[in-house]
């Protein structure tokens, strides 16, 4: 199965984040000190360095809007699709 990606743009460049988030990502972020810490840990585990730089460069409104759209489109992997 091809990796499903969420696409976003910043300064005319296209970046991606995976739409499917595996449980291991959440496990690695489970000991974060706060929800904000957990959230950024998840982004750092999933985003390429280029995508992280683009997110870091965004004004807060653009950042919040982009991540809201990503989280609305992100899905947990279907267990039946991972068993093939």
Image (cartoon, helix red, strand yellow):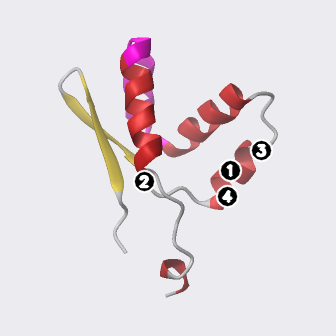
For the residue labelled by badge 1, is the local secondary structure a helix, a strand or a loop?
helix
Q: Nearer the viewer, residue 28 or 59?
A: 59
For the residue labelled by badge 3, is the local secondary structure a helix, a strand or a loop?
loop
First in sequence, mark 3 or 2: give its number: 2
For the point 44% across and 13% down, the residue is: 60
Instruction: Give residue 77's mark.
Output: none
Whether the residues at callouts 3 and 1 have beta carbons within 8 Å, the answer is yes
Q: Quadrant of the N terminus?
A: bottom left
- Residue 43 vs 22, above or below: the answer is above
Say few, some or many: other residues with alpha carbon within 10 Å of mark 3 (under 14 / 14 to 19 / 20 or more).
some
Q: Which residues are magenta?
A: 47-61
- Label 2 to label 1, Cα distance in Å? 14 Å
- Label 2 to label 4, Cα distance in Å? 15 Å
The residue under label 2 is: 19
**Where residue 4 sits: x, y (%)?**
35, 60
Is residue 69 shown left or right of residue 29? left
- Label 3 to label 2, Cα distance in Å? 20 Å
First in sequence, mark 2 or 1: give its number: 2
């Amino acid at each position: 199965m091809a990796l499903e990606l969420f696409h976003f743009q910043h300064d005319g460049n296209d970046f991606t984040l995976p739409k499917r988030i595996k449980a291991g990502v959440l496990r690695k972020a489970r000991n974060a000190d706060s929800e904000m810490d957990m959230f950024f840990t998840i982004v750092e585990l999933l985003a390429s360095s280029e995508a992280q730089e683009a997110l870091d460069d965004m004004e807060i409104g653009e950042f919040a809007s982009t991540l809201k759209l990503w989280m609305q489109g992100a899905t947990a992997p279907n267990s039946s699709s991972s068993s093939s």
